[in-house]
Image: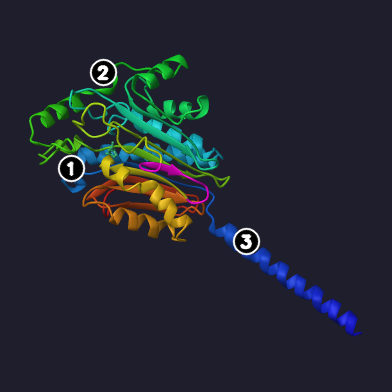
Amino acid sequence: MFRALSLGGFLSLVGVLLMTITMSSQVRAQSRKEFAIVIHGGAGGDPAKWTEEYRQQRRAGLTAALEHGVEQLTAGAEAIDVVEQVVRMMEDDQTFNAGRGCVLNENGEHELDASIMDGRNLRCGAVAGVRQAKNPISLARKVMTETKHILLMGTGADEFGEAIGIEQAEPDYFRTQRKKASWQRWKNQDVDAQLHRPKTIGPGDEQLYLGTVGCVVLDKQGNLAAATSTGGLMGKRWGRVGDSPIIGAGNYADNQTCAVSGTGVGEEFIRHTVASDIAARIRYGGKTLQAAAKTVVEALPEECGGVIAVDGMGSMVMEFNTPGMSRAFADSAGNRGVMLGRDD
Ligand code: ASP
């Protein structure tokens, strides 16, 4: 009798335990979003001072890129493919400072930086100071998949792209009339010798150092990826490389922690190892994505830039210490938005 009862008791205890485990994994499964995507189109400048036309242009570019990403993710596409495709779209849009319509260096030439990272396996690829690839982000991906290296630079990177058949473009494709005019204004200004940025910004000069692009994604398979692409800073010294192609500074993705893309004064992002610091605070400090990103961005010099990030649960973060950061986000739970300034 005692044995039968205790067996019965034991079995019901197992039943209760199993139910609890099933319920808690359901709760976890429910709270993990199926997918999440955040994109940025650069920080810097004050969106409140932009013309309505320019604001609309930026919103339209962000919306189109976001919609494309959401469509792909809904259909089950992989994070690494989505970040590349979305960044390609923004590189092709001359509103942003990446690919076509990039800012120009001190000599009035273009030198593009980009990187991509796969959170599944920490594989990554990057290019710096390239001039020929129509879409630097795709060249960066080829460095990841077709070489045993991570970062290729200058003519070596361009030759590699040409050799493997990456689509090429002429200098005038990248150097739009609008960016040439901005460069001319920059040339006539008093510039900060260290950062090659204007000390003052006149009306209409919102083009000067705005518009680096980035995308971070959690896909339906639970994988993370990040991609970032830029023309750098207007009037930068030729040969200067920013944070965007530096893994752990302007770009990072690791399924264990998060995917991050940064925008702002690259020198500071490199100095503060911004993207990997956010991941490290989650990994070793047990911080949430939100808390980690906030702490790291707050530690940057004033009006320096911002980050977008997602984690494996689909939390989305957009932190910046500039008056604005062009950004858009969407997830499988129906959250969605396109914003330029602090509140709109
Ligand atoms: N971070 C980029 C760079 O320094 C510029 C930007 O994000 O606007 O090259």
Where residue 87 appears, x then y in whole percent?
39, 34
User: Which residue is tagged 3?
Assistant: 26
Where residue 329 appears, x then y in whole percent?
40, 47
Pointer 1 or 2: first along the chain: 1
Q: Residue drawn 59% across and 57% down?
A: 29
Q: Nearer the viewer, residue 117 or 194?
A: 194
Circles 1 and 2, Cβ within 8 Å, touching? The answer is no
Measured in 3D between alpha carbons, the distance from the residue under mark 2 to the one under mark 3, in whole angstroms, is: 55 Å
Is 344 left or right of 182, judged from the image as shown? Answer: right
Measured in 3D between alpha carbons, the distance from the residue under mark 1 to the one under mark 2, in whole angstroms, is: 26 Å
Near mark 3 (Cα within 10 A), the count class, few <14, some 14-19 or many ≥20, is few
Where residue 277 appears, x then y in whole percent?
39, 51
Query: Which region of the structure is painted magenta?
Result: 248-257
Q: Is mark 3 within 8 Å of ligand 1?
A: no
Is 218 left or right of 8, judged from the image as shown? Answer: left
Main SS, magenta region, reads: loop
Of the residues shown, which amino acid type is indicated by label 3? Gln
Does dot 1 land on a helix, a strand or a loop? loop
